[in-house]
Every structure is written in C-alpha cells, then in structure tokens.
Amino acid sequence: MLGSLGLLATPFAFGSFSPSSSKTRTLSSKSNHQLAKQLAVESRRGSRKLLGRPVFLFNSVYGKVSHGSPILAVMVDDSSTMTSSEEDAEHIGILDVDSALEPFKDHFQYRVKKYLDQKNLFEKHEGGLEEFAKGYLKFGFNREEGGIVYREWAPAAQEAQVIGDFNGWDGSNHRMEMNQFGVWSIKIPDSGGNPAIPHNSRVKFRFKHGDGVWVDRIPAWIKYATVDTTRFGAPYDGVHWDPPPSERYEFKYPHPPKPKGPRIYEAHVGMSSSEPRINSYREFADDVLPRIRANNYNTVQLMAVMEHSYYASFGYHVTNFFAVSSRSGTPEDLKYLIDKAHSLGLQILMDVVHSHASNNVTDGLNGFDVGQSSQDSYFHSGESGYHKLWDSRLFNYGNWEVLRFLLSNLRWWLEEFKFDGFRFDGVTSMLYHHHGINVGFTGDYNEYFSEATDVDAVVYLMLANSLIHSILPDATVIAEDVSGMPGLGRPVSEGGTGFDYRLAMAIPDKWIDYLKNKNDEEWSMKDLSWSLTNRRQTEKCISYAESHDQAIVGDKTISFFLMDKEMYSGMSCLADASPTVERGIALHKMIHFITMALGGEGYLNFMGNEFGHPEWIDFPREGNGWSYEKCRRQWSLVDTEHLRYKFMNAFDRAMNALDDKFSFLSSTKQIVSSSSEEDKVIVFERGDLVFVFNFHPKNTYDGYKVGCDLPGKYRVALDSDAWEFGGLGRVGHDVDHFTSPEGKPGVPETNFNNRPNSFKVLSPARTCVAYGFWNFGWHHKSLPVSMVLEPFFEVKTWIYRFLTNFSQVYHRVEETPGDINDSNLTGVNETLQVDAVKEENIAESASVVDIMETKSLPVSIESPGVEESPGETNDYNLAGVDERLPIEGAKQENIEEPESPGETNDYNLAGVDERLPIEGAKQENIEEPASVVDRSFAANLDPPEAEEREDGILDD
C-alpha cells in the first residue's frame, strides 16, 4: 500500500554534463546524481517529524535502502535546503479557508514539504521545474549538429539497437550505449547532407532483456505512431516525425482569453462524422467547430487525442503519450484544428490520461516493463502496478524519470500544439492506493487524509498544476474526481492540489437515478436542489447533466431515457407531439438548464446531447460486428427543419447566450429561496437572474409568487416554453414584473422565503423561466413608458445596500440535509451571527447556497447532532444548504432498447396537423413597490462534500 512512497529511482540524467559526452563523464557528475538521490532520502526522513498522526508510519520505506547502498556512501549535509522547505511548509493557507482541516495539518505539511523538496532538487540538478519538463528535447529522436540523436530510458535492457526503414530493420550497425543512469543513446550522422532517418519513416527500439530475449518496442517518446489498416490486428509502428519547414503547420492565432465561466463542449473527433466511419481532425475543424461556436460554447474538450491502439477504449488506454491519434490525421492536422478553434475564440482543452497506461505490451509503454524492479520501470511492480478493473498499468509517481516523462508530456502538448489546458482523467485512482475501487466516500475527512492517500501522486499533481500555470497562466485545468477530496481545487501555494475546477460527478448520477427509478410525482425538489448545490464553496465545479460516460453502451442519452422508442416515430413537427415526446423535450430542456444554472461555476455538454441525440454510443467491436453505426453523430437530425431536435438545440444555444449576457456561471451569488414539494417548483437566484423551474407534470400556476433580492423590475430573459424552443408560448415576454416589499427590513423571518422582495409570474407545467433584473444595462429594444422610473429604482437600490451594511442579523436556520456524513459535524441547527459585512453585493439569507466568501462571518454552531448516512455530502464550514427530504424508493422501470432504425432522417414524416394554438394569457403587471426594504443577511455552512457512486468504481 505504501510502495509509491519509496525511493526516487533515477533522479538525474542530464545535469551539468554534455549529453554527448556520457563516456567521459567526470566523478563530479556522478556525485551530483548520488547527491540528488541522497537528498530525496533525507527529504523523507526530515519530514518524518511532521507526521504527528499515527497513520503516517513510513518505517517500511527506509527498509528498502540497504546499508551497502552507494546512496548512503555519499552523505552530504544539505540541511539548508531542507530547513527552507520546512519553513515554507509551516503555514498551510488552505487551513485558513477550511478550519475543519486543522486536524490534518500534519498531512498537509508533509505533502507540501515533499513538493517543495522535489522542486528544490529540480532546481539544483535540472535547472528548475520548467527545464526539467523539457525532456522531449533530449529523449526520443532529436536533431543535433550533424545528425539525429536518439535516447531511451531502459535500465532493464542489457543490449539495445535502433531499427527501422532507414536500416532495413537490421540494427547490427546501430547499437546503442547505456550510461550509468539507464539511458541508452546513439547519434546517427547525416548522409549526404540529409537526415539518415527520413521524415515519416518507421522506427522501433530493439533491446535484449534479462532472459536473453530480443524484443521490439515503439520508442517511449515517439511523436507519431501508425498501423497498417489493411492488416487486421497489425501492430503499431513508431514514426519519425520531422517535416520540412514547408510542411510544418504555423499557428496564426493566439490563445483566446480564459473565460470566467467555461461552457465546455466535450467532443470526440473520431466519432464526430455523420457517416459510419472515423472522422479527421480537419473535417472536425471545418464542419463541427462552427456548430460549437454557433451554439455559444467558449471551450472545447477533445477526447482521445493521445494515441491508443484500441479504438473502443474511448482514448483512455493510451499507448503512446507524445503521439497524436493517427486515426484522425497527422500532428499538423491537429494543429490546424486547434488554430481554427482559436480563430473562433474557442479554448481547446485536452483530455489527458496520466492515471494509468494501456496494458498493451507490443504497442505501448508497458512493453518496457520486463519484470524489473519498480525503480527501474515506469510502473509499480506487482499488484500495486496493476489496475484490476481497468486492466491497465499504474505509474510510479515517486520515480524521477516517470516525473520527467509525465511533466514533459504536459509541456509538449502545451508548447507544440498550443492547447489551452487539460482535463485530467481518473484523478481518484491517482489520489488513493485503493484507487477508489469498492470504496464509498461518505465525506468523512479521514477518508481523504490517511495512509490510503498516495502522497507521491498528490505531489505529482501539484507539480503538474504548478508547471501548467507557469507556462500558460490562463490555462484551464480540470480534475475528474469522484471522491470530493478537499483542497483539490485550491492553489498549490495554499497547500492545495492546484486544479481550477473539478467535475461535479454526482449530478449526472442523480439524473439517471431519477429517470430510471422515479415517476414524475416522486421527484423531490429539495433533493434535486440539494444535489445541485452540494459542493465546496471555495472550489469551483464543472456541472453536467450527461457526458460521454452516460451514453456508452449499456446506458442511454437523457433524451432516449425520456422518449425511448418514440424518438423513432414521434419527432416530426408535421404531426402533433405525443405526450411522451412533449414530456421528453420539456424535461430535456429543464434538466440541462437547471444543471447549468445551479450546479457549478462551469458547464459541460457532450457532443450531440445539445439537440437530444438518440440511442447510445457503441464503438466498433467484435460484439457488434465491428459496426460504426452507433459511433457517429447524426447531425442531419438537427439540420432537418421539420424534426423536433431543432428545438432542443435552439434552447441549448439560448442557455449559453444567456450566460454570455449575464455571466451567471461566474457569479458568486447563488440562493435557492424555495424548493416546494407540493408545487414541484424550485426558485433560485444566480447573479442578476431569478430562475423559476416548475417540474409539476400538470399544474400551471398563475400569479405564482417568487422571492428576489433587489427591488425594481424584472423581465423574461429566457423561457423554455417559447415557440422557438418547441413550447406553447404561454409566458408573456413583454410583461414588466414589478417587485413588492416583503416584511421588515433586517428581519428575515418576516420576509417571503427569506427574500426581502417578491414578484408574481405565470409558471406553466414542465417549464423553466429566467427573469432578468431590468436596469440601464439590460432591456428590450422597445422601451416601455415605465423606463422613466428606472432612476428611482437605482436610488432605492443604493439606499437599500447602504442600510444593509449597518444591519446586524441573528437568524436561526433549521436544516435537514439528509445525506450528510461528516465526522467533524456536531449538528445542523446553526445560529449565525453576521456583523458588519463589507462586500458591496451582500449575500442573502436563504435555504440553500450563498456562494460568497465567509471570512467576515463570525459563526457559532450549536446542535444536538444529526444521524449521518453516506452519499453526496456537502462541504463543512463553506456553503449554505437547503433542507433535503429523504429520497423515496421507487421501482426501476425496465425500458426495452429498440432495434436500430437504420437510416434515421426519416423519423415520422407523416401527418400534417399544425401545432396546437397558443394557450394561456398575458400576465398581469404587478404593482411596483411602495417603499424601500432593508436586506436581511444570513449564511449557512455545510459539511464536506463527497460524491459517491454505488459501486465506487471509476469509469473511463
């Protein structure tokens, strides 16, 4: 379990000596190498005194170093470096953010010190972290004066050769030499002024291991790899990629600005064609990127970029880490795609897989493992080096050369291809020695900080995020973590892991649970609002209703869960929509919109789901006859004017446009004021918008009263029931909704749903409407007469804020959150005292979440306690929570999967009935308020979040 905390294997390969002079290396260079190793050992020993908790007992680590080791023969006192690291690690900023982490101070000090020690070693022996991450300029094939130099780290090899097309696959004349660090090298002189190894020619690394057997492997640092597609099951070949200047792609456009609220379009290039085949990078750039831009996304997340020999792995079983997937084109083609995206103002994130590697021996990195010890391999040895559920190999993050390989890999994609950031896959597997297998995270902080934590992996992620943001300060880096580890999204400078965002992975699981197991009447508004707001206030999340995970074979897209086989016959606008289709389209819009508006600080959608793509995803495999039928995107469905897919697509476009106008994703103001189980209505505020979601299957509410913050006038900003979104047009868009004051200033219990103002709306069944606060910054083109009242409202708003700053509020909040599990939580009845709040935008008292900084909030907690249960829990001492009712059990409905329809662009073309006439009436103008109302303020603090899946298994 503690194997990864072992000795650094080969911490120095290119120090103060010339790479070409390995044979004449001086004693001092060898001493530097030994010194680096010794400092690594001393670092671990020096940090031992920080480990006050009994779970951190690392005696077994030191047992791995024998007394006769040359490492111990070079004892150098470098206490100044270690002392500096200890001093830097003494103050952990994240403890100021979340005081509940204070009992784990020793853990944070230990990993921060280990991170600083590692950076110090890089600085001393490699020129610093950024220089260390330029390994691709040394390893692999590189042009040097008068020839090509090839280097490979393979300490387990006894002999080695380079072979390929250039020498007829006979390496007898191209034998390599190994230095004392396990690095094999050879310089191949130019021939007649031309490179001896031509561009785009095949190459491999041939070596003999301990059994005397010669094997051929693809070079670990290869930039391109291809396969003979005419031969079934043919092995991949490494390709020397060094195009002449005339064939190199030159970038024309700079990185676009980093969006405050990323709206991410998750895409797979290979399956982006409407035809049953693999699509190319250039086709994706020309055909799909304009669609993404038209739907107002600002970020594209590309899957399956790194070469993977098994297509059906979705790109997650990587074989060649520095090579682009050759199925879709060349490295220059990928550069064209990224540059085209930048020209459209789109950031491009890469789905990077550093959590494991393909088990493929012939084509991948695993081929370098021939049974040697972990310190001489990229992977752990034995069971700790194998993921039994993924059938893949696990990296040894404590190995110097592994760190060089992975950190250089990140820099390679940033520098060579101009990616704007990464989405790190399988982070949970990296964070823990148990890899999250059969582990249900309940939110107890002890689950995150114990001997189960892989500190080497955490330190690697800290180094990775530090490197990424030093190279590209505006980079966006996202973690796929299901455990909810605190600090994952806090800066490295505070002792956090350094990610900008993490995926809110519990949200799609919640929607699938509701769609599979509950009828509409059983949907709990409190449970939904809790699940959507259940996250750490100080760590940003990317919310999503469905990604690629939810649509892979064995499951379905949300639209197919909702409408199932009727998507084959009921999507034509030339006939009346069936109740199933009408319900499906309405809920599809509502599910995605409330997830976006309430679920996080960013939003993600998988390719095709914006228009309700039917069915599921199934890559070509033996089980489906190697068919591409379910491994494509049927763009014709949304492009066909008389099909209803256009309505869902138009609403998706409008959702993103709404954030463009109001920037609600990046707003820290988030308050759920009502989650009515009886009405099946959720009302909340995000930024300057008030959202009303009516999930009731039948009831329409006329004159429905909703609470709000500022007094003034509100108008419809987005309406799912509008005609252009396939609705019935029942909500009037030209109606002015004037607020009325509620209760006494500074006394929340006298307000309406703890909101100081209210207005009334029409809320049809299964619709959602966003209302915008009307001021000089936003209004319709045709200005109503009432605009003359606007300056009056502006003055009232200023007075309102001024009075609130001097109010002191004591407010008792009753919480029944349900799935809370935190050993540090003493109760849920909180007495909150707020005194002299300084922010201009004062956070409002509400039942769910007020995502504002709480530094100025003196808080006392008094409660008899609460029974806790595992599940999706919330952050302790960070954000407010709404009451949550237990989820009622329900029988799971078995939905039969229909047979494949074949050509799907002829969905139900019969019928000529026009749409139903507009029902409903214009809403009445609500009277404007007569007085200025002071604002009450209170905040709720919630326990630590952990997102749990039943089986605890991480998929990808």
Image (cartoon, rainbow, N blue to C red):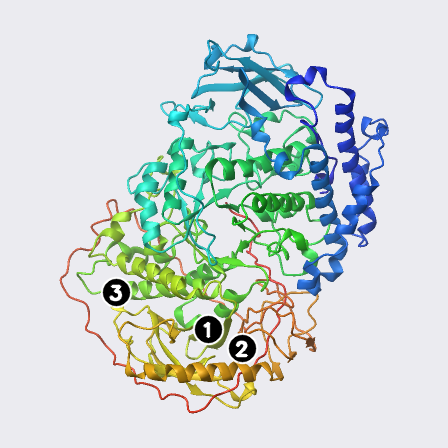
Q: Which residue is mark 2?
A: 844
Labelled disc at residue 199:
none
- What is the distance, in whole Å, between disc 1 and disc 2 at their CAs? 10 Å
- What is the distance, in whole Å, between disc 3 and disc 1 at their CAs? 25 Å
Q: Is residue 436 left or right of residue 236?
A: right
Q: Is residue 727 left or right of residue 474?
A: left
The percent coordinates of residue 326 (x first, y second) are 41, 31
Answer with mark 1 or mark 2, whichever residue precedes in sequence.
1
SS class of the residue under badge 1? strand
Q: Which of the two marks, 2 or 3, is nearer to us in this view?
A: 2
Q: Which residue is mark 1?
A: 685
Looking at numbered disc 2 in the image, what kind of residue is underneath it?
Glu
Task: Choose top left, top right, bottom left or bottom right for residue 515.
Answer: bottom left
Pick the front one: 176 or 768? 176
The percent coordinates of residue 389 (x first, y second) are 56, 42
Q: Label 2: how many residues lie within 10 Å, few (<14), some (14-19) or many (20+)?
A: many
- What is the distance, in whole Å, between disc 2 and disc 3 at their CAs? 34 Å
Looking at numbered disc 1 in the image, what kind of residue is underneath it?
Glu
- Check the picture and name the quadrant holding the N terminus: top right
Q: Which residue is mark 3?
A: 724
Q: Label 3: how many residues lie within 10 Å, few (<14), some (14-19) or many (20+)?
A: some
Q: Label 1: how many residues lie within 10 Å, few (<14), some (14-19) or many (20+)?
A: many
